Amino acid sequence: MAGTAKYLMIASMDVDPEHEATFNEVYDTEHVPSLRKVPGVGRVSRYKREELTINIGGEARKVSTPGEPAYVAVFEVESPEVLTSAAWALAVEEGRWPSAVRPYTKNRRHVLLKLISDTD
């Protein structure tokens, strides 16, 4: 399904610094593998925000994003219904995520994007 997803679900959040190592370990070794087993979930990519400098109007500008979460996970999904399925509901509660990670996250944001155009 990689590269063919019609929807992206983006989960962004911050984590308390003292729990960052556990957050990353559980996300990569438990949470993502559990969610990847849900029918209709494709590729999952994780990112950490960095400072952005971009050329706009012929000059390099630093772009400030105050309040934006540091961590972002991008889930390719076949349809919005994947996110309300029984399989998804079970997967998000598996492993250590609910008890060892979720309580230490904050500034959580979830966004669903529908593909409207695609070029190679």
Image: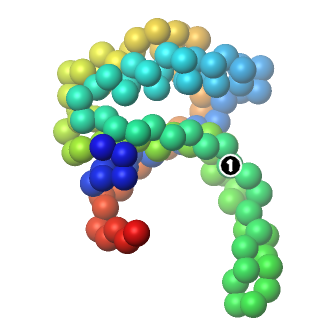
Residue 81 image point, x, y percent: 19, 39
Above or below: residue 95 compared with residue 81: above
Choose between 33 and 81: the one closer to the eye: 33
Quarter of the image for residue 48 reads top right
Task: Specify whether 116 is left or right of 119.
Answer: left
Type of the residue with mark 1? Arg
Furthest toward the bottom, the residue is 58
For residue 42, say whether it is visible: yes
Above or below: residue 27 compared with residue 93: below
Quarter holding the C terminus is bottom left
Asked which colour scheme the image uses, the reply is rainbow
Residue 47 image point, x, y percent: 61, 43
Above or below: residue 14 compared with residue 59: above
Task: Specify whether 45 is left or right of 91.
Answer: right
At horizontal 22% and vertical 45% (from top left) the residue drawn is 79
For residue 11, say whether it is visible: no
Quarter of the image for residue 33 reads top left
At horizontal 37% and vertical 71% (from top left) the residue drawn is 119
SS at badge 1: loop
Residue 61 image point, x, y percent: 78, 76
Label 1: few (<14), some or many (≥20) within 10 Å?
few
Quarter holding the N terminus is top left
At horizontal 51% and vertical 40% (from top left) the residue drawn is 45
Quarter of the image for residue 59 reads bottom right
Choose between 33 and 66: the one closer to the eye: 33
Choose between 61 and 25: the one closer to the eye: 25
At horizontal 56% and vertical 39% (from top left) the residue drawn is 46
Residue 40 image point, x, y percent: 24, 35
- Residue on which the image places disc 1: 49
Task: Specify whether 74 is left or right of 17.
Answer: left
Task: Specify whether 32 is left or right of 84.
Answer: right
